[in-house]
Image: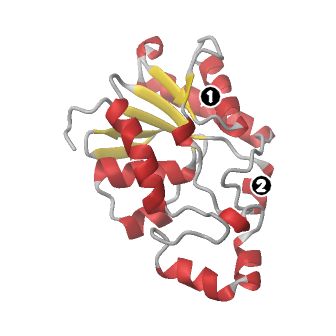
Amino acid sequence: MTASRPTIYFIRHGETDWNLEGRLQGQKDIPLNDVGRVQAEEAGRKLKALVSHVEDLAYVASPMTRTRETMEILRETLGLHPEVYRLDDRLVELTFGAWEGMTWKEVRKAEPSLAALREQDKWHYAPPGGGESYAMLVDRVRPILDDLTRDTVIVAHGGVARAFLSICCGVNPRQAASMDIWQGRVLMIEGRSYRWV
């Protein structure tokens, strides 16, 4: 990976009721709640303070409701037309398969041995029922990074942020799988380094 890759301003979607309840959302299409909408505005204000010409950036979002809502609120906060951005299906969150809609507590109770296997190696474990691992997600999102031609705002999901940190910044998989990915903030990825704003 070269340092000449465009800067990425990564924004995780705002809070949903399922985030609040600790439910595994994965590819379930859950809308933002009121807190999530405020977080989208906060991210927009932080981005505006970071970048003087926000209109020159590219804007790409996961096609899920929570990411589109976040992007549209963020763009409105920046004074841009809310609906002028690109969707990329490759940015959807990893799927938790049969576990989607459950809390980790419920998963550990229902399938303790499988939950333990995931704890041993979060990066490579794919949940039952067609779930994806972070390693599989990396393969899915890597081409997006190769396609970037200019500094870009990406609104997506916690799993996607962890994959980007591994690919772009060399964060080791064990660490990346457990990192907090904040809502209402901007994760700035420049070359091999990253910082939260």
- Mark 2 is on which residue type? Trp
**Is residue 185 among the parts visible in the rendering?**
no
Residue under pointer 1: 71
* Extreme residue in the front direction: 130
Q: Which residue is mark 2?
A: 18
**Residue 94, numbered circle:** none
Indicate how the structure is coloured in the image: secondary structure
x, y percentage for residue 28? 74, 50
Q: Position of residue 51 (x, y in %)?
A: 41, 21
Q: CA distance from mark 2 to mark 1?
A: 19 Å
Looking at the image, residue 8 sits to the left or right of residue 39; the answer is: left
- Name which residue lies at 46% across and 77% down: 121
Instruction: Please tell me in which quadrant of the rendered image residue 127 appears.
Output: bottom right
| Location of the N terminus (image quadrant) | top left
- Whole-percent x and y of residue 156? 56, 40
Q: Residue at x 70, y 73 (%)?
A: 104
Query: Which one is nearer the viewer's eye here, 52 or 119?
Result: 119
* Vertical relation: 174 (above or below) 93: below
- Crowd band around label 2 with a 10 angstrom C-alpha radius: few (<14), some (14–19), many (20+): some
Query: How many badges with numbers are in the image?
Result: 2
Amino acid at dot 1:
Met
